[in-house]
Image: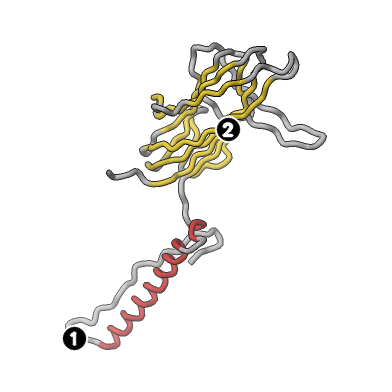
Amino acid sequence: MANVKQQLDIPAVPSLSSSGEVYSQSVQNQNNGILRLFFIKLANVIQSVIGPRGGKFLNNPYGAFQDGTDQIAANTTTAYPITFDTTDFANGVTLSNSSRLNVTDSGIYNIQFSLQLVNTTSSSQDIDIWFRKNGTNIDKSNSRYGLAPRKSAGDSFHTICAVNFFVDLNANDYVEIVWRTSDVGVYIEHYVASSTPTRPSIPSVIATMSFVSNLPTI
């Protein structure tokens, strides 16, 4: 049974009467009625969850984050964590230290991101983007993107990169997205809202995390 907040009302454990040492038909009938009502409510809850639209009652951890600033590398030999300045949604996935996506519950998580990349140089450049868990690089999580040279001195090359990745996390673990570039003229850029026609602003980074499953036991 669902309320206006789409939360399931779990039936309370029934309180049954005792007939004492002597069997009582009336007490037995009363208990049977209580149990019947309890199981009807319980069956309705189960049906709501496993039905074709049961997912609307599930409350899984998730988070959505973005950044509205340019993210620029000072040099080509340092790995820089992607930072965020806005939390759009947070339910068991929270932001700390500007770059850490923390989870409250253990499980398998799906992390997705898109970065708005720009190359201001007159040469082709590369950028690597990968994941860290609790400060340690995640093996085989790197991606390399090749960026074409700028089109002209006043017209840089623009592209967007996107990755979808599963990661296993324990409670209170955190994930970071990290990047390095072959030239400081390559960076992650944001754009303000535009007109003619009216267009929304472009975040430099968008990232989401959502709970997929509990951790395997074997």
Residue at (69% x, 28% y) in the render: 191
Q: Which mark is residue 22?
A: 1
139 w.r.t. 15: above or below: above
Residue 85 visible in this rendered orientation of the protein: no
Q: Amino acid type of disc 2?
A: Ser
Q: Quadrant of residue 5?
A: bottom right
Residue 97, given in percent of the width and then of the height, sits at: 49, 27
Q: Residue furthest bottom?
A: 25
In the image, 56: left or right of 35? right
Residue 179, given in percent of the width and then of the height, sits at: 51, 22
Residue 118 visible in this rendered orientation of the protein: yes
Residue 81, given in percent of the width and then of the height, sits at: 50, 23
In the image, 36: left or right of 64? left
Residue at (49% x, 39% y) in the render: 209
Residue at (56% x, 32% y) in the render: 162
Local secondary structure at mark 2? strand
Residue at (58% x, 34% y) in the render: 206
Residue 127, given in percent of the width and then of the height, sits at: 55, 20
Q: Which mark is residue 86?
A: none
How busy is the neighbourhood of tag 2: few (under 14 within 10 Å), some, or many (20 plus)?
some
Q: Earlier in the sequence, mark 2 or mark 1?
A: 1
Task: Name the residue tied to disc 2.
Answer: 114
Front: mark 2 or 1: 2
Quadrant occupied by the C terminus? top left
Who is closer to the viewer here, 126 or 37? 126
Local secondary structure at mark 1? loop
Who is closer to the viewer here, 64 or 50? 50
210 w.r.t. 154: above or below: below
Q: Residue furthest right?
A: 196
Does the residue at mark 2 contact the one at mark 1 (Cβ under 8 Å)?
no
Q: CA distance from mark 2 to mark 1?
A: 72 Å
Q: Amino acid type of disc 1?
A: Val
